[in-house]
Image (cartoon, rainbow, N blue to C red):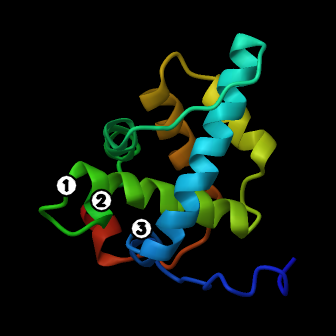
Amino acid sequence: MEKFLSFTPQYTCLEDVLIDHNLARLGDAYVNFIYSIALSKREDKATGAKVSSRVLAQALKRAKLRGFLPKRMDRHTMGDAAEALVAYAYLHEAISIEESVGALLSANNATEAFANLLCQARERLSFNPTASESTL
């Protein structure tokens, strides 16, 4: 899959993934797609939905990833960071669509579901330790 996804950078630290605006744009579509699949499975009918920045920002905080971002970020930018991480994990084959949907279905609410997914994505990606990690 490497040549097919040659447009995706190979990052060595989590911070670089979280602030990649291009990954966030792609992640927006991917996150809404997996969320729509999860809702469709839960409701047993096809549906489409968008995940709010508020939900993603809260999930990022619950997953203890806020400390990897610069200070003074609004919730939209934190939501973008969450989307970037989920997309990066998928593109680098750290988590599949099926696993993503499963993680979303395993929780009682969207914030908890995305926090679980973000934790799972981070655990499966290997990054060099950074100064931010030692302060968390």
Above-or-below relation of 13 to 75? below
Q: Secondary structure at mark 2?
A: helix
Residue at the (34%, 66%) spot, across then down: 133
Q: Which mark is residue 74?
A: 1
Residues at circles 2 and 1 in contact by the CB criterion of under 8 Å: yes
Q: Amino acid at mark 2?
A: Thr
Give the labeled residue for mark 2.
77
Where residue 16 appears, as percent x and y from the top left, is 42, 78
Q: Amino acid at mark 3?
A: Leu
Residue at the (51%, 37%) spot, across then down: 50
Give the labeled residue for mark 3.
18
Q: State left or right for residue 74 relative to residue 84.
A: left
Residue at the (70%, 12%) spot, across then down: 43
Q: Crowding at label 1, few (<14), some or many (≥20) Cα neighbours within 10 Å?
A: few
Q: Is residue 122 visible?
A: no
Residue at the (60%, 85%) spot, across then down: 9
